[in-house]
Amino acid sequence: MTARALLLVDIQVAFADAWWGARNNPQAEENAGRLLAHWRAAGAQVYHVRHLSVEPQSPLNPAFGKVDFHPAVAPAAGEPVFEKSVNSAFIGTGLEERLRADGVEALVICGLTTPHCVSTTTRMAANLGFSVELVHDACAAFAQNADTSWRDGGKADPKFIHQAALDHLHGEFAEVVGVTEMLSEAP
């Protein structure tokens, strides 16, 4: 059987900050917590990733004191934690080396935000040869700020952004699955 691990990406308290704007799927953290409890109960492998932004205005910058993990997914003693300052959990973190050393060949990924660090990490995982299942309802996205959009039309809806990111990943980089499906399977 292929060793399958749970990878939780950037599920941090900073994402509750109003700076981000409108968001879809307010249950993402709790759903990720359900997955984590399922993995722990089975004694399966779990890996945590935390974003430490170097952007001065970002709530994910350690200077704001909001980089802690969301309480629903706080790492337990002995669970590996990787810190990054870029979108991919694989760049500059040692994550790939640890996964390979632990015999992991398949990843179940969830986290924040869907079109950014989750998408980038999912794409890289697939490109590195890992089989990936991406849990859509344990991820979330924010509305795009009209000030940073390349197009006319105002802010894009966070639900649309979330779905579009998943659409681009499904079938090529990952299989998009739901929490209920994952909880019905052994990790």
Image: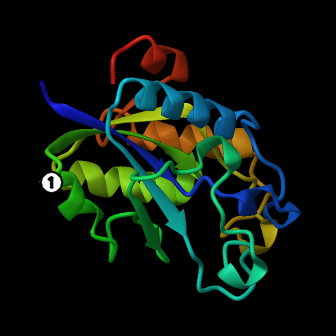
Q: Is residue 35 left or right of residue 125?
A: right
Q: Nearer the viewer, residue 98 or 119?
A: 98
- Tell me which residue sits at (83%, 58%) in the image: 21
Q: Position of residue 17 (x, y in %)?
A: 83, 62
Against 48, is 95 above or below? below
- Tell me which residue sits at (47%, 75%) in the image: 86
Categorize mark 1 by other alpha carbons within 10 Å: few (<14), some (14-19), many (20+).
few
Which residue of the protein is positioned furthest toward the front in this rendering? Answer: 77
Please state, as top left, top right, bottom left or bottom right, where the C terminus lies in the image. Answer: top left
Q: Nearer the viewer, residue 39 or 24?
A: 39
Q: Is residue 53 left or right of residue 169?
A: right
Residue matched to label 1: 100
Q: Nearer the viewer, residue 173 or 19?
A: 19
How many badges with numbers are in the image? 1
Against 127, is 92 above or below? below
Q: Is residue 98 left or right of residue 64?
A: left
What amino acid type should be assigned to the residue bearing mark 1?
Arg
Against 38, is 29 above or below? below
Q: Position of residue 3 (x, y in %)?
A: 19, 34
- Tell me which residue sits at (56%, 58%) in the image: 10
Q: Is residue 6 left or right of residue 68?
A: left
Please state, as top left, top right, bottom left or bottom right, where the N terminus lies in the image. Answer: top left
Q: Is residue 144 visible?
A: no
Q: Position of residue 126 (x, y in %)?
A: 25, 48
Q: Is residue 146 visible?
A: yes
Which residue of the protein is positioned furthest toward the top in this rendering? Answer: 184
Q: Position of residue 57 (x, y in %)?
A: 75, 83
State the image quarter where residue 54 is shown. Answer: bottom right
